[in-house]
Amino acid sequence: MKHIFALLIAALVATLAQAQTVKIGSTLALTGPLSATGMIHKVAGEIYVEELMLTVDKVDLLIGPYATANIVAAVGVAQRYNKIIWHHTAGVPSLLKYDMQFPTGGLPADPEVSLPELVFDAVAHAPKAPKTVAIVTSKFPSVHFISVGAREVAKKRGLQEVAWLEWEFGNRDFGAIAARVKEANPELLFIGAIGVEGLLLVDALRKIDYTPPLHFHMFPAPGPMAKSPAAQRALALTTFEQHPPFTNNPVAAAFVKTYNERAAKAGLPDNAVELQAAGSFATWQTLEAAVNGAKSIEDKALAAWLKKHPVDTIIGTLRWETPSNYMPGARLYKIKQLQDGKWLVVWPQEFTAPGAKLLAP
């Protein structure tokens, strides 16, 4: 996979030294298996930077790349140089012990427990609550870690596990996995997938005339999923979708409008704001809040300010309360479902799209 420096930008100084600039470096995967979601973060970041005014004096600020494995590597570099780093998509908190790394995508400190619990809470409110589950997963670090946790959560919930399957990240042939899923015939298919992996699996299932009653995809590429007939009624994790109550926030509403236009111009298969774009935007909001709040661009000053101050973002209020700087519990995460080509939040009830409910065959 090719990683390039996608966002190396300069922003004007806001409050301390208007003649200076700040360079914010970020790496993104714009080719390979993660490119479908990496491009979303590029567009979202470019939108925010155009409107951003930062206090700075000859210093680089760092935003981590997309996805756990890449972020772990980037945090190691930041630690070597005693730099603060923000990141939005690292899903294994235990791998990140550096005190000046700050997750900004809303992931909880215990994703292997609280995220599966959120999924099982949601499907318990389906027209027919599932009693059996097949858990299948990529070996990509975060989704595999959460899927392993889902096995334990399912057991505690009294769900019968009828299949456990794994595949190597980057796999493109899901025929054999689809055959085993069909044989297991679960009432819930829990898919630990990232990017287009889940879509490839449901396409393979469709070719053998099988559709699970409920199928959950952990971190799918939203656009390709939305365009596929095989993916209809898929469930997934999210923190933001472009419908009320999320768009009641005027900052979020303005971002949605601009992002819709830019994403369409960039040729993305779906130009709607959802988990990926919103998490990227929240990262930039956090960076700006820290600089303005600390009145400094010094790394330790920014980190100290963030430890003491929550930040309101379009995905909710972020706090850094645990040794790993992650939030406890699944406070900001929701469950969405693909209905008629659109992603709609269906759980928890206070965040559901107007008139929406979880659907199943």
Image (cartoon, rainbow, N blue to C red):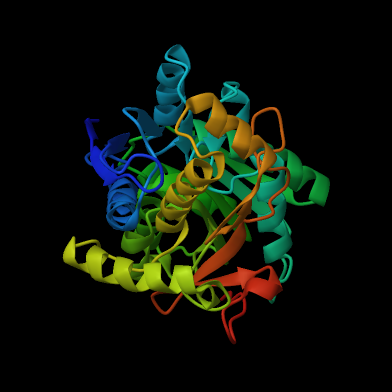
Residue 154 or residue 292, whichever sits in front:
292
- Residue 356 occupies quadrant: bottom right
The relative height of residue 178 versus residue 58 in the rendered view (above or below) is below
Q: Can residue 139 be seen in this view?
A: no
Residue 255, horizontal then vertical, whole percent: 38, 67
Q: In this view, does 46 lie to the left or right of 108?
A: left
Q: Which residue is drawn at 33% across and 44% down?
A: 13
- Residue 223 occupies quadrant: bottom left
- Residue 93 occupies quadrant: top right
Q: Could you tell me which quadrant the N terminus lies in?
A: top left
Q: In this view, does 315 lie to the left or right of 85?
A: right
Residue 81 or residue 215, whichever sits in front:
81
Residue 227 or residue 92, whichever sits in front:
92
The relative height of residue 357 versus residue 291 in the rendered view (above or below) is below
Work out which residue is located at the far bottom of the displayed protein and give it. Answer: 355
Residue 132, horizontal then vertical, whole percent: 69, 55
The relative height of residue 190 versus residue 165 in the rendered view (above or below) is below
Q: Which residue is drawn at 64% across and 72% down?
A: 351
Q: Can residue 145 be seen in this view?
A: yes
